[in-house]
Image (cartoon, rainbow, N blue to C red):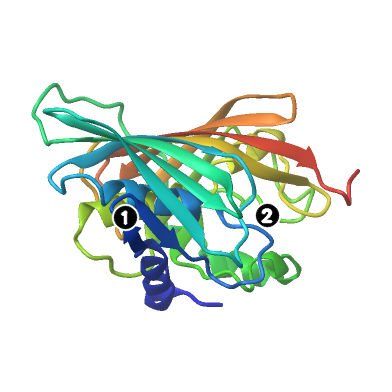
Amino acid sequence: MLQGQAAVDQLLELLDLKQVDAATFRGESPQTGAQRVFGGQVAGQALVAAGRTVDPGRHVHSLHGYFVRPGDPTEPITFHVEEIRDGRSFSVRRSTAKQHGKTIFFMSASFQIPEEGLDHHTPAPLDVPAPEDVPTFMDWADKYPERMAMFKASPRSVDVRYVGVPGWVPPGDRDAEPLQRVWMRLDGRLPDDPLIHACALTYASDMSLLDSVLSTHGEVWGPGGVIGASLDHALWFHRPFRADEWFLYDSASPSASGARGLANGRMFTRDGRHIASAVQEGLLRPSEARA
């Protein structure tokens, strides 16, 4: 399993899209044997493509994306960027990802020049242990080696530390909890470019968010539990941050119905700054083993 700086370097390679022309870019996927492209990857790459068409002095403040079709990890992804508007303060782009001539994902992203204004945010949770005081991914993996098959081939560029119980433990080993709290950071050093950090955070934001829907019911992913897929994803960036420094992903699910679940997430730095907010809806169905 590729992890640490080597995995982060591979992620940086995935985000370093090849430019075909002024509005077209091409991206690759890691060859891990996965059946579909990880949603956070295609979202991060779509943001890279959009960001490369915008003045570097304008930073992304929000994005809204829809996952239309599963991505094929064995084929390159072509990203086409449409320039919607360049105003005095904001730039808006639409980034569309295609494979085999069909759209698999599209995103609208907005960029803004730095400005001063009103500043407030709700406080970070106080009752959360530090990332050093909660189990690592490998601590959980050692406890449940039989559940490791789904992770063995996937690079682990993000250090994920669950404050509670992960969503991939065996059925029956997870109590219902209304909140899902996870410490995260890119598991290596990133360049200083703010766009890279925004894209890395976009990549990480697709990890564990839907867990909060399952956590509400004490459910788990995989055999005997639930299978799912992201339907849409929105992310707002509030304050400067580094994705290679610890942030708390504080998530909850306000609703689940019709085989869909909605999740809200807030991201806080260790010193309590609210750096980003995410909302995602996912398709959630009983696994075949359970049906």
Identity, as a three-letter code, of the amino acid under mark 1: Ala
Residue 21 image offset from top left, x and y in percent: 32, 57
Q: Position of residue 10 (x, y in %)?
A: 42, 72
**Residue at the spot x=11%, y=24% of the render?**
117
Of the image marks 1 and 2, the number of the one nearer the N terminus: 2
Tell how many labels.
2
Please name the residue shown 11% across and 36% down the image: 114
Task: Kindly state the secondary structure of the residue where label 1 is placed.
Answer: loop
Q: Nearer the viewer, residue 87 or 102?
A: 102
Residue 191 position by quadrant: bottom left
Image quarter in which the N terminus is found = bottom right
Label 1 Cα neighbours within 10 Å, binned few <14 / some 14-19 / many ≥20: many
Q: Which residue is mark 1?
A: 243
Marks 1,2: beta carbons within 8 A: no
Q: Is residue 41 above or below residue 209?
A: below
Distance (Cα) linking label 1 and label 2: 24 Å
Say which amino acid is labelled 2.
Answer: Trp
| Residue at the image position 19 percent from the left and 30 percent from the top | 90
Residue 37: name its quadrant. Answer: bottom right
Could you tell me which residue is drawn at 55 percent across and 32 percent down? 263
Q: Is residue 79 visible?
A: yes
> Can the viewer see residue 273 in this picture?
no
Disc 1 versus disc 2: nearer the observer:
1
Q: Which residue is mark 2?
A: 168
